[in-house]
Amino acid sequence: MTNPMIKVMLLLFLVLSIGADEELMKKECSQTGNQNLCLFCLESDPISFQTDRAGFVSITIHCLKSQLDILINDVTSLSKKGEGEAIENVLEDCNVNFSIAELQLNEAKRNLVTLNYEKAFESVKTSVSYLQTCRGNLQKIKFNESPHEFYDDIDIYLNLSSVAKTLILIKVMLLSFLVLSIRADEELMKKECSQTGNQNLCLFCLATDPTSNQTDLAGFVNITINCLEAQLDILINDVTSLSTKGVGEAIENVLEDCNGDFSIAKIELYLAKGNLVARNYENASGLVKTSVSNLQTCRGNLQKIKFNESSHVYDDIDIYVDLSPVAKTLIDRLH
């Protein structure tokens, strides 16, 4: 079984960071211009000591969302003080601005899952403008009822957004380095990945295996199956960690069912490998496709009980769902 701690190598493709520890956190935060705030945010999530650079970015996005919740609570409290119609109208506009900023953060998270870091960066940057609009409007009416709380909370968001943007840029630079490290003579890798519908995800998966530039299409298929197996290990680890948090019997039962779903998916990938050896490519492709349904069953059951304890499970399922068509397309090209 592949160690879940090498998620960074197998699915998020930062070969340079093998397992994150406190030193990696300090190193990354030292580059953000606000090391203390960066570390404070990362240390607020217990998984930060077991994740990678991609995980750091996700955690900072979560911190930004939490800071928006604080600002929404600030506005709600201030609105109840009866400060007059003019101030209440501006505070209402601020709430709208915060809601739009939250949508931008949701978009950033989606772009992180699909490895579109440039768009994620822009979404975080755009979210800041809505908070600046709120502050500007309040300052126009000379609102000073609670400057040390409300304005300071906006400043925290602005400073934290700079941390998030810097961490995203670090990802972009490292991923660009990884792409450039694929030598020009590796045309086959690029050609095959261009057919999958998700070239970046395909290339980064293949690049994690040092033999990828010396193998053929059949080898590419085996590497992507290995990536899928590694992602299942990550999901099993996610669910196991959540089950230890005392989330209640109903949720624990669904998480236990999810573990069963992931185990069945692993069996299907094992069978897919056997069919690849036997050159029964149609069956192998079908087994990869079927494995996805098990993860979708888990996600559907979690959504039915409105489980929102951790976005990591949903994000990690999305990675598997995005990677499986890559494997399936490569298998189909073996026919």
Image (tube, rainbow, N blue to C red):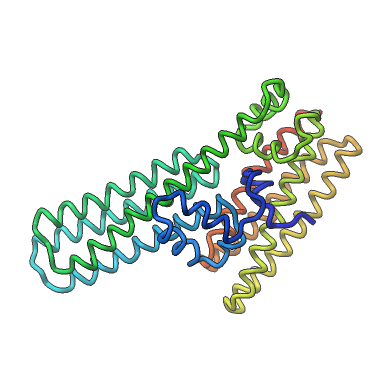
Q: Is residue 282 left or right of residue 241?
A: right
Quarter of the figure that contains the C terminus: top right
Q: How many marks?
A: 0
Nearest to the observer: residue 335 or residue 179: 179
- Name the outermost residue toward the right: 278
**Residue shown at the point (61%, 59%) measured from the top left:** 21
Quarter of the figure that contains the N terminus: bottom right
Nearest to the observer: residue 272 or residue 204: 204
Q: Is residue 246 visible?
A: yes
**Residue shown at the point (72%, 59%) measured from the top left:** 262
Query: In the rendering, at what x and y percent does residue 38 appear?
Result: 44, 58
Q: Is residue 307 visible?
A: no
Query: In the rendering, at what x and y percent does residue 149 appear?
Result: 24, 68
Residue 246 occupies quadrant: bottom right
Query: In the rendering, at what x and y percent does residue 241 appear?
Result: 64, 69
Residue 24 occupies quadrant: bottom right
